[in-house]
Amino acid sequence: MTKSAFVAILVFLLLFFTLRFYLFYRNQPQHYNGEYLSFETRILSSPQFSYNQQRISAHLDTGERIFITAPMYPQFGYGDNVRISGKLQRRVLENKKLILAMYFPKIEANKNGKNLLLAVTGFVRQKVTLFFEQNLPPISASLLLGIVFGIKENMPKDFANDLRISGVLHVVAASGMNVTMVGGFLSSIFSFFLKRQYALIASILGICFYALLAGLEPSIIRASVMGILAFLAQILGRQRLASFSLFIAAYIMLFISPSTLFDVGFQLSFMATLGLIVIRPIFDRDKKLKNLLNKSLIGEDVVTTICAQTSTLPILLANFGSYSFISIFINGLVLWTVPVLMTLGGIGGLLGIIFEPLGAIFLYLSLPLLLYFQKVVSVFSQVFGTLNFTNFSWQFTVGYYLMLISLVIFFLQRKQGKAN
């Protein structure tokens, strides 16, 4: 393909993309406070139960999320197809973010809308959650469920806040980083008895299965897609191909649902993956730094954290208003435990469904690492504070990314110059 043909195709795609956004937002309904709304949706995250209430996260056809508060009974679960009817409330949170909510609307289950695959997945998630909670202390169980499956509905609020302050909250979400860890671990296992190509295919299938167990929320689907791309980049060493695939995947996601552009999960997944693809090679090509990391106790986890946080810093500050100065250090202390915990927790959870005593052994083996993780997070979240931002301008974000792009180009050209 000639350069002019490539530019022509790119311009056409951008124009088509712009038209899609224009038509989408031109026809977007404007919801108002007190509006009566009735819609059908599928529950793709486990409801939270507390104080004789259940909280359900639902999505409209436009992609907008609505937070539902309903009575404890009848209870609804992962994968249920429901019709929700009630008055809409527009709420402004402390961080000035606007959300849509419904309080005690009418909810009817559609029995004909059940999905067999999601029903099986929901049953497995429920069994694994109960098994973890029966064999581990509450905080340890919630931490392991978060690390392995991204299930954090029953996590104590105080501990979740400690994770946020210490900058390791991403560990208990099915993020691109966790998906990449799953792929890397599976690749290491499969490579012992399969050829490279077959090991890669098996690893990708494993990531798909992990995404299914973690829950098919839009954020998890995006993280899985982008995590697979980052995983391919590390195995094949084809950063350009991975970058191109990442942008194509983002293009398709945004074309299907333009509102995804303003979803924080999408922004973090995209930029974190891009950071791993683009910034990581700068560290990998520095032999002295690579040897130093291999000899250190915390290894390359610090590099992964630096790449991900460097590429997502403005998004974190703009949406959460705080940043921990020592988050990179804390990540270095605890991230090495994540692959081990994912392995022990994953094997223990699956075996626990078949034969509980055998699965429990793996959970008990994970307990010392879980207690270590909890202690590090608890101590450092109390000793060190965070840098808080009340106002965060878009000009800073633009300037930050322009400077970051300039630095990446400079270091990559410098490395290429030395190689030549």
Image: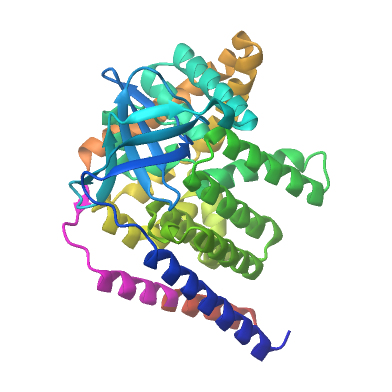
Compare residues 252 and 110 and report the one nearer the observer: 110
> What colour scheme governs how the chains and residues are painted in the rendered image of this protein?
rainbow
Left or right: residue 80 versus residue 94 is right
The answer to whether residue 295 is visible is: no
Instruction: Name the residue located 46 percent from the left edge and 22 percent from the top edge.
Output: 368
Compare residues 234 and 258 and report the one nearer the observer: 258
The answer to whether residue 160 is visible is: yes
| Quarter-of-image position of residue 211 | top right
Residue 44 coordinates in the image, percent (x, y) = 49, 36
Left or right: residue 97 versus residue 107 is left
Compare residues 298 and 350 and report the one nearer the observer: 350
Q: State the residue lying farthest toward the bottom.
A: 4
Residue 204 coordinates in the image, percent (x, y) = 69, 46
In the rendered view, tell whether residue 105 sits above or below residue 335.
Answer: above
Instruction: Name the residue located 59 percent from the left edge and 56 percent from the top edge.
Output: 230
Name the image quarter holding the C terminus. Answer: bottom right
Magenta part of the chain: 386-405
In the rendered view, tell whether residue 107 sits above or below residue 31.
Answer: above
Main SS, magenta region, reads: helix
Residue 90 coordinates in the image, percent (x, y) = 23, 46
Count the marks. Answer: 0
Residue 358 coordinates in the image, percent (x, y) = 63, 12
Instruction: Name the residue located 43 percent from the left edge and 37 percent from the top edge.
Output: 172
In the rendered view, tell whether residue 248 sits above or below residue 360.
Answer: below
User: Would you say residue 310 sits in the magenta stretch?
Assistant: no
User: Would you say residue 404 sits in the magenta stretch?
Assistant: yes
Name the image quarter holding the N terminus. Answer: bottom right
Instruction: Name the residue located 43 percent from the left edge and 34 percent from the top edge.
Output: 83
Left or right: residue 162 versus residue 278 is left
